[in-house]
Image (cartoon, rainbow, N blue to C red):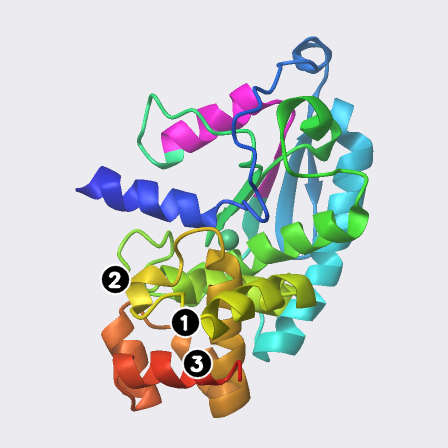
Amino acid sequence: MKAGIRLAALFFLIALIGCKDATKKPSQAGTDTVSRSEALTLKGNFYRLHYHSSDKIQAEKIAQWLDQGRSEVIDFFNSDFKAEFDVSIFPNRDSLDTQWQKDWNMPDFKSQCWMVASGIAYRLDILSPRVWPTQACEHDSNDEEATRKLILHELIHVYHGQHNPSPTFDNIENIDWLVEGIAIYACGQLDTARYDRAKNTIIKGEGPVLLANIFKGEHRYGYSGSMIKFIDDTYGREVLNQLVGLTKADEVLAVLAISEEELIDQWRRSFD
Ligand SMILES: [Zn+2]
């Protein structure tokens, strides 16, 4: 049961934005370079960034995005991180898998090629964008804006974990849509195209009618992000910030003083 919860948590914490082709087999190119490189740590204002010398350029860029991301997090939530945390840039997928196997107590876990990053209260893990061309799919390391948003997305999970009674999101109940929705919405990944794709299915009468089904299927990020946008637009940022500290959907509904059916109905009507 625990492993099941952990697996669910892992999957929704991993950046899998816009992934369709999970069949491409990533190669392990780059491993030799790593065995010759040195493990280094860069001490930031609110994080410790661990990387290999082969990823010096990536580390400098990511440090810049983390610093910028902190300001964006404070602007959005009107609150800062509670504690320092570790950021690790993994030089190849094997080393990332080893970390995730340990974190989630799943010794046989093998990540898929679209899984490149994750975030919980204590740590942010990322596969070095240097190896994305050969060891990842659906992510373009040349697209710096998309990569910056991906880092910010995970940074928001770290913030969320630090302000939630379940820092690793192991003990949450039916709020995967909230956790992912806040990250997508606050980092700017709910772009017009994603929003419109979700909107089109809702207008056609498709789409989820239960909170448990919002973060499911092809449009899960569009549904989750637009639900958070609806809550933010309707209830305001202060209420949205209150939801960050909750672990159960029932608590969320109580704060919003609404039934599940009514919330879903109002959200669906917000697309009209
Ligand atoms: Zn996420």
- Image height of 3 relative to 66, above or below: above
Q: Callout 3 environment at 10 Å: few (<14), some (14 to 19), or many (20+)?
A: many
Q: Residue at x 72, y 16 (%)?
A: 37
Kind of residue at badge 2: Glu
> Residue 224: x and y, percent?
47, 65
Q: Is residue 224 magenta?
A: no
Callout 2 secondary element: loop
Q: Residue at x 29, y 62 (%)?
A: 212
Can residue 66 be seen?
Answer: yes
Q: What residue would you read off at disc 2?
A: 173
Q: CA distance from mark 1 to mark 2?
A: 27 Å
Q: What residue would you read off at disc 3?
A: 267
**On the image, which quarter does residue 165 sit in?**
bottom left
Query: What's the magenta region?
Result: 87-102
Q: Is residue 248 left or right of residue 30?
A: left
CB at mark 3 closer than 8 A to ligand 1? no
Q: Callout 1 environment at 10 Å: few (<14), some (14 to 19), or many (20+)?
A: few
Q: Is residue 89 magenta?
A: yes
Q: What residue would you read off at disc 1?
A: 205
The numbered disc on residue 41 is none
Q: Residue at x 74, y 45 (%)?
A: 62
Q: CA distance from mark 2 to mark 3?
A: 21 Å
Q: Earlier in the sequence, mark 1 or mark 2?
A: 2
Marks 1 and 3 close (CB-CB < 8 Å): no
Give the farthest residue toward the left. Answer: 1
Q: Earlier in the sequence, mark 2 or mark 3?
A: 2
Callout 1 secondary element: loop
Q: Residue at x 72, y 51 (%)?
A: 146
Q: CA distance from mark 1 to mark 3?
A: 13 Å
Q: Earlier in the sequence, mark 1 or mark 3?
A: 1
Q: Is residue 140 left or right of residue 183?
A: right
> Residue 119: x and y, percent?
50, 49
